[in-house]
Structure formats: structure tokens, C-alpha cells
Amino acid sequence: MSFTPECRSPAGVGEVSYKGGSVLEGQDPVPRPLTSWLRSLFGRRRISSERELQDMIDESEAGGLINEEEGEMLHSIFELGETIVREVMVPRTAMTCCGLDAEFSEMLRIIQSSGHSRIPIFRGSVDEIVGVVHSQDLLRFWGREPDAGWLREIVRKPLFVPETMTLEQLLREFRRKRGRFAIVVDEYGGTSGLVTFSDLVEEIVGDVADEDEEEERLLLEEEGGGILVDGRFPIDDLEEYFNIDIPREKFDTVSGWVFHLLGHVPIPGEEARSQGLRMTVVESDSRRIGKVKIDLPGDGESAEEGRDHR
């Protein structure tokens, strides 16, 4: 993303403006919440480059002016100009489509089963997308069986975009066409996939959400003073959960730590102990550790590091 940001404060009021070729300028102004954010952070300070602005975001995060998630979201906005549609689109093989000659009942079934509000319509094959139907358009036929060719009455002209378009360009196109849905085509005009406005939002805020969801999936169960985790559970999160510091070797997950302590691939029931914790292997095979129960040994129990029991 190329632009030259500049902070100005006419009449003594902090204001941020941007110059250059960017979605954050001119007819495509900075979103109001982001503008307010930048004003509150940088005030009258002049910013001469994108790199300087990113450094200032880092400084603001380190200084506690913004939290880690806010910093990541701000940085994600800059990456829109470096990410292409192909990287975030729903691929052709995962698209839910409907033929132009489909009956009303079939279209209704597709919408209900897929959970999607917009369905691409094709003629002959998915490589010939002729339009998009919104679920709300079906209401006009509710309670009656429509005539043949009913889809042609409500199909909307699709927005086509190349798979090499950047997300910054896609955002501009969505704003210019007032669209929220586009069919992605390859260099030969064939259908590569589809992309939505939600995919853009996901690219900005989704990484943070995905990390939280992933952590929840890996923390399988909490019981008493212990937990049951997937072997991929991060050591960082384990340290935070039990408020301990684990000396780092060449491992980042619970399974890697258990391998390190035992020196072999354990079988279910084996235990490893370290830092006051007892790790009991619950599920494993010849290559990996699937699940581990982690708790604090009771009084009188051995907490000898690396010791395993069967």
C-alpha cells in the first residue's frame, strides 16, 4: 500500500490526512473510527512515510496506548495492498452454486442447506456464471409455484474480479459498485472462486479471532485444577494458565515438551513431570501425541523432573 500520510492540526484541532495512491485517501477516506484513533494517537505529529506510521503503531502498542489486537488490526489494513484475492477467496471447489434452470424448490433447498444468502447462478457449467440471487429475492414467489424461467426474473448482474486483484483494489471496487460479493476469474476467464466483503473484514480482524478460536479448540476440558489439551496446545498459553516459566528448548507445544522430557514417543498412560506439573499422555500413536492431561500432583507425590510412570 503506497501513500504518504501527513498529520495536520488546523485551528488547533488534531487532524490526520493522507496523500498518495491508497484506499486511505481522497475519495476513499480513512474510516471514521480509524481516523479518530490516529488523531488521538498522533495528534499534530507529522508522518512522512508508511513505515514511520507502522513504527508509531508499534510504539503506541508498546506504550499501552492501544492493545495488541488493535495493533494487529491496524497493521492488517496496510497489508490489504499486499494480499491478492486468490489468497482469501472461497475456491471454486467449495462454492455453492445453482443452475439457471433450477426449480424454485431446489433453490430454496440450496439456500437453506448452505446457510448462504447469496448464490451464484450458472448456465451450463460453473465457468459460465450469469448472475447472483439473493435469498430475499425469493420472497416474491413465496406461497406459489413460479413459472419456468423464474430465476431470470430475479438474477442480479455479478461483479467479476481477477484473482490477482489486491484486496485494497477490491475494497475500492466494492465501494464504487456498492457491492458485497464478487466472482473471481482466472486469466482465461474461467471461474476461480468467489469473494465477499466479509472476507475483507475477516482479513483485517479474523487473524485475532482465529487465534482465540484455535486456543479454545486446543483446550479440550478444564476439571478441578487440571486441564485436558490437544498436543498442539502452545507452551506460551500453558505458562500463562499455570503462571509458570518453562525453560525453552526446541519445542513450542505441549507434545514437544513431553517428547523432550521423555526422550521417546510415549504410549497412553505414561507421565512426564516438570515445573511442578504432571503431564499424563491420554492419546498417542507411533508418530504424535494427541491429548495430554496436565495437573498439579497431590501432596506426597513425586514431582521429579522427566520421571515417567505407567
Image: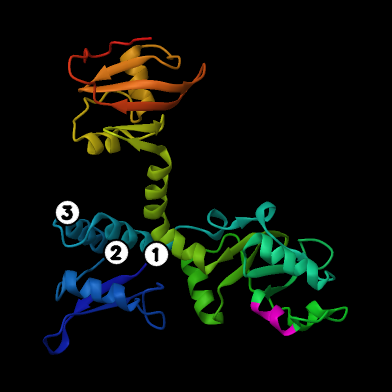
- Between the residue at mark 1 and the residue at mark 2, the CA separation in whole angstroms equals 8 Å
Q: How is the image coloured?
A: rainbow
Image-based side of 94 in relation to 103, left or right: left
Residue denoted by label 3: 62
Q: Nearer the viewer, residue 248 or 242?
A: 242
> Of circles 3 and 1, which is in front?
3
**Vertical comparison of 90 with 180: above or below:** above
Image-based side of 72 in relation to 166, left or right: left
Q: Is residue 141 visible?
A: yes
Q: Position of residue 60 (x, y in %)?
A: 18, 60
Mark 1: which secondary structure?
loop
Amino acid type of disc 3?
Answer: Ala
Residue denoted by label 1: 1
Q: Position of residue 161 (x, y in %)?
A: 61, 68
Image-based side of 228 in relation to 195, left or right: left
* Magenta highlight: main SS: helix
Q: Position of residue 24 (x, y in %)?
A: 37, 74
| Quarter of the image where one finds residue 310 | top left
Residue denoted by label 2: 50
Amino acid type of disc 1?
Answer: Met
Magenta highlight range = 136-140
Neighbour tally class for label 1: few under 14, some 14-19, many 20 plus, Cα within 10 Å: some
- Between the residue at mark 3 and the residue at mark 1, the CA separation in whole angstroms equals 24 Å
Q: Residue at x 15, y 58 (%)?
A: 64
Image-based side of 236 in relation to 112, left or right: left
**Vertical comparison of 225 with 298: above or below:** below
Q: Residue at x 45, y 14 (%)?
A: 267
